[in-house]
Amino acid sequence: KIWAGLHSLREPVDFHNQSPLTLREPVSPPQSSMSSPSSPSSFMFWNCNGLTTRLSKDKHLIKACLSSKNPDIVFLSEVRMLGEGPHQQGSASRRDKRAQEDYADFHRAFSAGGVFGAYDVKALSLCPGKRYAGTLMAVRSASGVSLVDVSYSIPGATAASAPASSSTPSSKSSGTANKLTNFFASKPSPSKKRKADSGSPGLMRHEKDGRVILAEFAHYFVLHVYAPNNGNKRESWERRLAWDTDILRFFKKVREEGGHAGLEGVKKPVFYCGDLNVTPEPRLDTSHPAWMRAQFQKPESPENSGQPGCTPGEVSRFKQLLEEADLLDVYRQHHPDPDPANSSSMDSPFLDLTDPLFTWRGTPGKDGNPAAGRYYKKGMRIDLLLCPTSALNMFESCEIVGAGVDNTSREFCGSDHCPVMVKMAEAETAVAKTAVATTTTTDTTTTTAAAEV
């Protein structure tokens, strides 16, 4: 079985390599009894476009958003803080004055009374070479959510999304990293393990730019990412193609087991969210479909012509992911096409483009001339949540928080992206808890029940 490696953790996960910015209690070790675990009832994901910049300029907007939405979990992408080093991507650097200032701002934000004072950092993955990319996950302290495990790379990654460290999982790696990657390759011999892996308690394999957080909760997994932009050069096209290939490969493996990852008989859905940097359907998911398609024409590579995120190649590969991995776009399922009869049109079917339709919006021009901005009044929906078809009923809602003509509305909190807020269906959570509790039945009871049948 592909997912045979997914099993209950019998030893506490070593979280020593978590960021020193985990300010209060560390992640609780997995419970020995899963009779009453708690999964998030809501979560928010947001490309903050530089966290310390947001903290210095827009902290009141962030605090108001968190207070209003009150998510159990917050995922942030494009954190853009400097990682300590290639094998310490879970630690923020303090190697120079700028890094020290970033660290101090971050520390204050997650301290009592700070912008994120109600939240505890549970996962952090940073780019070690520059202030670029980076992801973070924080859990609301009073939520009661149980984080089972966390890892930092796409399981089975072979190319652009491969971990920065050795492709060999460390014996000290997190449980999820081991459980979700071991089925892709035979177990390497100890002699091939990097010396850096031995003697580094809790060393966790990170995607090289800090783009991935894979969190396991009691009833589901969340793979949160900051996908690479397709860009306008061959190097970036190849990087994005490699990323999409790794993602498709992983979720096809998941589908082979029914769209879930197994845990001693329990089936957990794997949700995929974050800044995926692609518009599922340009007609619906961009404000100006024809204009977006006309940008950055590349005669030598027609599949990469157009605004990154809207190119034929990216859109085609995204549709392939949905079809071959049996995934659904949760937002679109809750907000269907208002004019399906004209699905072949290149005109947006929405009458008011200032409605909360797009997660990314352009920046107005400067010097009192907003129209001078190239992307002013333009937007794209590129921050997405995907789930297996069989798990759609686990979601009560999926909402785009921001609206307006550009990214200056309060809901964008200073970024060019606005948050996406997700609420889980209470009834489905109850069903999931029942399923988990059922697995605690003893072998004797199970045998007796089978005999009675």
Image: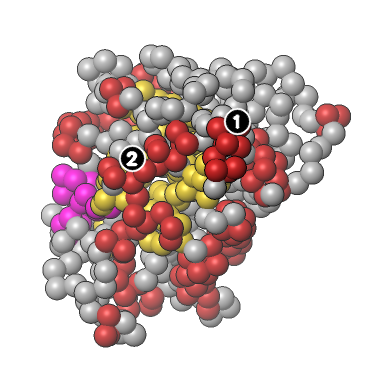
Residue 71 to residue 257: above or below: above
Mark found first going from the N terminus, 2 or 1: 2
Q: Residue at x 61, y 32 (%)?
A: 443
Q: Give the left or right position of residue 342, taking residue 160 as reference.
A: left
Which residue, given by chain and number where applicable, does mark 1 sit on? 444
Q: How far apart are marks 2 and 1 (CA)?
A: 26 Å
Q: Give the left or right position of residue 284, taking residue 91 as reference.
A: left
Q: Which amino acid does label 2 sit on?
A: Ala
Which residue, given by chain and number where applicable, does mark 2 sit on? 430
Q: Where is residue 184 in the image (x, y as percent from the top left)?
A: 71, 48
Q: For the magenta stretch, what is the residue range?
A: 398-412
Nearest the camera: 89 or 26?
A: 26
Residue 315 can be seen, yes or no: yes
Residue 209 can be seen, yes or no: no
Q: Where is residue 357 in the image (x, y as percent from the top left)?
A: 23, 61
- The secondary element bearing badge 2 is classed as helix
